Amino acid sequence: MRMYSARPGGRRYHPVLDRARSSTSGALALLAGGVLALALGGLGELHAGWFRYAAFAGLAALLGASSRPTAAPVIGLAAWLCCNAFAEHRHGELGWAGAAPEFGHYLLFTAAALAPALVAALPRRVVRVEALAAPVRRTFAR
């Protein structure tokens, strides 16, 4: 009976990858957010409309794909901080437009990080084993 076979190097072998923790993901998100803000500034898209949100949401999704699902709120907060400080306002100053818009931006970045993190956290494969009945032993009294 062949129950399960997968060899390293084969097409069906997918090892479980270690995901980054919340602290590591948050540090990477802050660093990558600063680099993205510099890149957007060089392109002249820093204070443009929807493009800055799409860029930071894409960054959050990239970082979320290699992180644990519990790191998504930290990645979302780091992306919101960088977007708010460098893309919406000038000179690294945090601005407050009200609770609803700022919370909506935070939810956008958190959802962008959480979606690929949840997909990556799904089990790679299900090993199916049939339940075999235990052999019945017959004992004869002598």
Image (cartoon, helix red, strand yellow):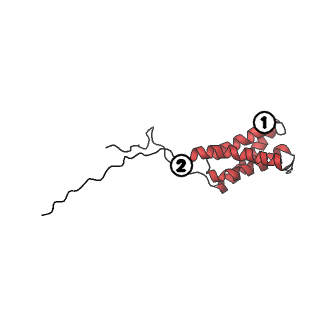
| Element type where label 2 sits in the image | loop
Residues at marks 1 and 2 touching, judged by CB atoms closer than 8 Å: no
Q: Quadrant of the C terminus?
A: bottom left
Name the mark on residue 51: 1
Q: Which residue of the protein is positioned furthest toward the left in this rendering?
A: 142
Amino acid type indicated by mark 2? Leu
Q: Quadrant of the N terminus?
A: top left
* Residue drawn at point x = 22 percent, y = 56 percent: 137
Using a 10 Å C-alpha cutoff, classify the residue at mark 1 as few (fewer than 14 neighbours), some (14 to 19) or many (20 or more).
few
Q: Of residues 12 and 41, which is closer to you in this image?
A: 12
Amino acid type indicated by mark 1? Phe
Give the quarter of the image for residue 21. bottom right
* Residue drawn at point x = 62 percent, y = 50 percent: 69
Q: Is residue 141 left or right of residue 125?
A: left
Q: Which residue of the protein is positioned furthest toward the bottom in this rendering?
A: 142
Q: Which residue is mark 2?
A: 17
Q: Which residue of the protein is positioned furthest toward the front in this rendering?
A: 141
Q: Is residue 136 left or right of residue 122?
A: left
Q: Of residues 60 and 38, which is closer to you in this image?
A: 60
